[in-house]
Image (spheres, helix red, strand yellow):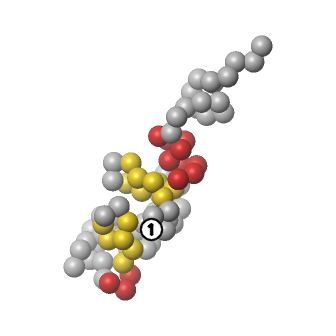
Amino acid sequence: MPNCPKCEKPVYFAERKTSLGKDWHSSCLRCEKCNRTLIPGGHAEHEGKPYCDKPCYSALFGPKGFGRSGIESYVYR
């Protein structure tokens, strides 16, 4: 029986959610930033950790540009 990558406890068949090539408890498959519960295949990953596609993954690892933290990409004149 595989162990959950988040809590390290055994994952039984009835409670298993498979994502990122690992078996998770449904309560452990959560976004690392906002703690939102995720569904298998409906999220992104970075360094093996799950993140919700929007807004967390986009804000943390997406391109920086207009309206995001960092330098604005459009200059008003």
Q: Please, what secondary structure does the residue beneath circle 1 have?
A: loop
Asked whether, in this view, residue 25 is left or right of residue 37, the answer is left
The relative height of residue 30 versus residue 77 in the rendered view (above or below) is below
Task: Confirm whether residue 32 shows in the render.
Answer: no
Locate the C terminus by quadrant: top right
Q: Is residue 65 left or right of residue 76?
A: left
Count of marks placed on residues: 1
Where residue 60 sits in the image (x, y, percent)?
Answer: 49, 41
Question: Picture quarter containing residue 5?
Answer: bottom left
Identify the residue at horizontal 38%, vertical 81% (top origin).
15
Q: In this view, does 9 lie above or below 56?
A: below
Identify the residue shown where x is 57% and y is 51%: 54
Q: Name the residue under label 1.
A: 40
- Residue reaching furthest to the bottom: 14
Q: 77 or 2: which is nearer to us?
A: 77
Q: Residues within 10 Å of mark 1 (few under 14, many from 20)?
A: some
Residue found farthest to the right: 77
Q: Where is residue 21 in the image (x, y as percent from the top left)?
A: 31, 64
Left or right? Give the position of 46 relative to 1: right
Question: Which residue is farthest left?
Answer: 1
Asked if residue 7 shows in the view, the reply is yes
- Going 53% across and 44% down the picture, which residue do you hit? 58
Examine the rendered structure and indicate whether residue 39 appears above or below residue 13: above
Residue at the spot 43% in from the left edge and 74% down from the top edge:
26
Query: In the orientation shown, which residue stands out farthest toward the top?
Result: 77
**Residue 30: x and y, percent?**
46, 63
Where's the N terminus, which quadrant?
bottom left
Residue type (three-letter) at the residue carrying disc 1: Pro
